Image (cartoon, grey):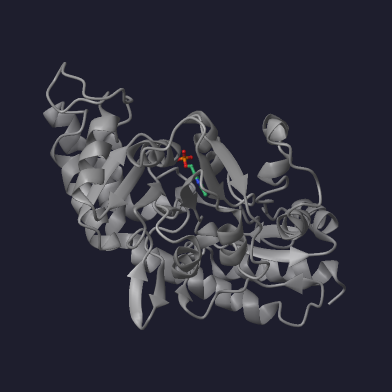
Amino acid sequence: MTHPPVPLLDLKAQHATIRAEVATLVNEVIEDQAFILGPIVGRFECAVAGLSRTRYAVGCANGTDAILLALRALGVGRDDEVVTTPFTFFATAGTIHNVGARPVFADIDPLTFNLDAAAAGAAVTSRTKAVIPVDLFGQMAAIEQVRAQIGSVPLIEDAAQSIGASRQIDGRVVMAGEVADVGTFSFFPSKNLGGFGDGGMMVAQDEAIFTTLLKLRTHGSVKTYHHELVGYNSRLDALQAAVLMAKLPYLEAWSAARRANAAYYDHALADVADVVTPYVDPANTSIYNQYTVRAQRRDALQSHLKERGIGSAIYYPLPLHLQPCFAYLGYSAGQFPEAERASQEVLSLPVFPELRADQRDAVVDAVRAFYGR
Ligand SMILES: *Cc1c(COP(=O)(O)O)cnc(C)c1O
């Protein structure tokens, strides 16, 4: 190999830059022996509410539970319908099934890969109890356009991949999670703000929703051993909150570094006809959780990159309406052509903030070489 190997993500490189801060906060938790909720979780919740410009934030066990608890807090249950995108991580729709409701899919906008607002509106029926747009790959969905299409139906914004992303709406900058009824985040290690394990958070502006979320994460109780509703054990670990609190001050710079890497690729791959570089809506500031291109010869390109030691990944190879577990919903191939085409064409390239210039060039050279450029 004439160039350095390039992983899709290098968490060791990131940890090397923050080792001391993480150790200090983690050690405080260990010295306190206060592992369940406690002050560090509260501090981190306040910080995420501040970032998201929401009145409330509630930590939970993971990004999947954040969606699950949000659905429950909005009263979604048996025989209800929830509209969402088929081109997302499984959790977005799995949670709808798990509260007893029916996932109803609507196609995506081929430019941004996010839920198409008009399609979402057309999928709403009298049984629709929520709509879940996903802020995929780091850029916000056109949430105000979705809102305009669905009337007063509650909105859950799955912002697992987009903490700190923003969007200009009517001349105002809006943060991911800010204008939904509930916004949800994941701190899975590969997200832009990743813990040393699982973690999640819900943000909201409404006090009644907030208090319900608080109850739901501790078996439906506020007063110990008195249960107002049947909830879950889904708390954000104090140790994870310590790690995340240490990392949070770096999030903005990390996301800016990802944007710089993305801009470099955009320029360096602009003349490669088969590679369509990511489209960011001019209203959006993306945090580039993924740098996802489209390529007709996607699978061959990925094999070529692999041979050269360059990491890449396909998010997502099978849209949710075609997953075996959702056969009972009765969807078939051809129903959501844009989601299906995206799943055939997408390839995510290394864009992590610690990517070195020589690694970035190795990615560019390898892609160009595949096309004989
Ligand atoms: C990661 C992710 C989730 C789930 O988060 P976990 O913390 O892994 O449970 C949900 N939705 C999307 C879009 C994600 O990327």
Q: Position of residue 306 (x, y in %)?
A: 76, 51
Q: Residue at x 59, y 49 (%)?
A: 88
Q: Residue at x 27, y 23 (%)?
A: 219
In this picture, residue 271 sits left or right of residue 136: right
When asked about the image quadrant of residue 39, the answer is top left
Residue 290 at least partly seen: no
Q: Would you place residue 45 above or below residue 61 in this image? A: below
Residue 70 at least partly seen: yes
When asked about the image quadrant of residue 36, the answer is top left
Q: Residue at x 27, y 35 (%)?
A: 239
Q: Nearer the viewer, residue 132 or 315?
A: 132
Q: Residue at x 25, y 37 (%)?
A: 212
Q: Would you place residue 254 above or below residue 90 in this image? A: below
In this picture, residue 85 sits left or right of residue 50: right
In this picture, residue 230 sits left or right of residue 373: left
Q: Nearer the viewer, residue 85 or 111?
A: 85
Which quarter of the rendering shows the C terminus? Answer: bottom right
Residue positioned most to the top: 225
Which quarter of the rendering shows the N terminus? Answer: bottom right
Q: Position of residue 41 (x, y in %)?
A: 21, 41
Q: Nearer the viewer, residue 102 or 201?
A: 102
Q: Would you place residue 206 above or below residue 232 in this image? A: below
